[in-house]
Amino acid sequence: MSEPHSSREHPIYLKYLTPDAVRAHLERDSRLIVPVGTTEQHGPHLPLGCDTFIVEQLADDLSTEFGVLRAPTVEYGVNAPTMNHYPGSASLRRKTLHRFLNDLVGSWEAGGVEQFIIITAHGSDPHQEAVSTLHTRQARVRTVDIFAVPIERANGGGTGPIHGGELDTSLLLYVDATLVDLSKARDYLPHKGVGRRYQRGGRGAIPKDSPGSLGRPSLATAEKGERLYHFIYERIASRVFRIQVAPEGSQ
């Protein structure tokens, strides 16, 4: 996939740096991007790491363009409940994810991080509660749910369910088409009540007769994914990374 324009060539990965290098970087820019994915089913056509691959690409591109440190990915989240068991799918409880992330941000804050940008692509309510209620001493935490932006503007109308459907599949086709097997995609349109719950995160279980996904992945294309990805990217970039925060006490 093509990346947003930047004079830099690579993301700035925290895990490759020494403590002295991290300290020097945080003195120039005290922000840290933390991508939080999931390991869960998204239908027979998508890998378990679908959400993770999408947020990793966003984190890499944002780190590259804006020169912000990028933390190692948290690859587990609070999965959407299901009525079936799917091999490999693994979920954390809300309290577990919340405590885990609190421990991480506490350590990083003590080392000089003053602002955290948490990026996630999973709208389940318990997952969102875990990632959006983190505690710090002074550092600012900004949680970005990429599907909370009005993506219908980039998709030409209504979006429908987004768990392994047209949107997820299109985005991953753009990020890495080798990870998608459209020959195995199965459309599943739940009744309206279930569909509304999963339009923006819900607590109901994914129905037993579904393929583990909701929506119409058969409509997905890499071209739609490219349009959606850049819409989401520009929304995050303009509202989180390009904003100039006025000093305290200024008018």
Image (cartoon, grey):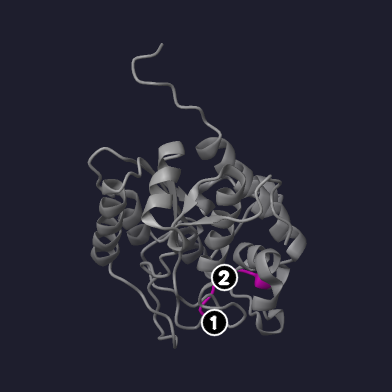
**Of tags 2 and 1, which is closer to the observer?**
2
Quarter holding the N terminus is bottom right
The secondary structure that most of the magenta stretch takes on is loop
Which residue is denoted by mark 1 in the rendering?
211
Q: Residue furthest right?
A: 223
Q: Position of residue 97 (x, y in %)?
A: 30, 64
Q: Position of residue 203 (x, y in %)?
A: 36, 64
Left of 68 or right of it: where is 167? right
Left of 94 or right of it: where is 157? right
Distance between the alpha carbons at the discs numbered 2 and 1: 10 Å
Q: Is residue 60 magenta?
A: no
Q: Quadrant of residue 124?
A: bottom left
Would you place residue 80 above or below residue 201 in this image? below
Mark 2, residues whose alpha carbon is within 10 Å: few (<14), some, or many (≥20)? many
Q: Earlier in the sequence, mark 2 or mark 1?
A: 2
Q: Which residue occupies the foreground of this view, 4 or 146?
A: 4
Would you place residue 237 above or below residue 228 in this image? above
Q: Which residue occupies the foreground of this view, 173 or 219?
A: 173
The tag on residue 79 is none
Q: Position of residue 136 (x, y in %)?
A: 25, 44
Q: Amino acid at mark 1?
A: Pro
Left of 180 or right of it: where is 29? left
Q: Amino acid at mark 2?
A: Gly
Residue drawn at the location 68% of the way across and 45% of the way down: 6
Which residue is denoted by mark 2 in the rendering?
164
Question: Marks 2 and 1: CB-CB under 8 Å?
Answer: yes
Q: Residue furthest top?
A: 251
Q: Is residue 212 magenta?
A: yes
Q: Quadrant of residue 17?
A: bottom left
> Which region is colored magenta?
211-217
Would you place residue 108 above or below residue 183 in this image? above
The answer to whether one can see residue 121 in this image is: yes
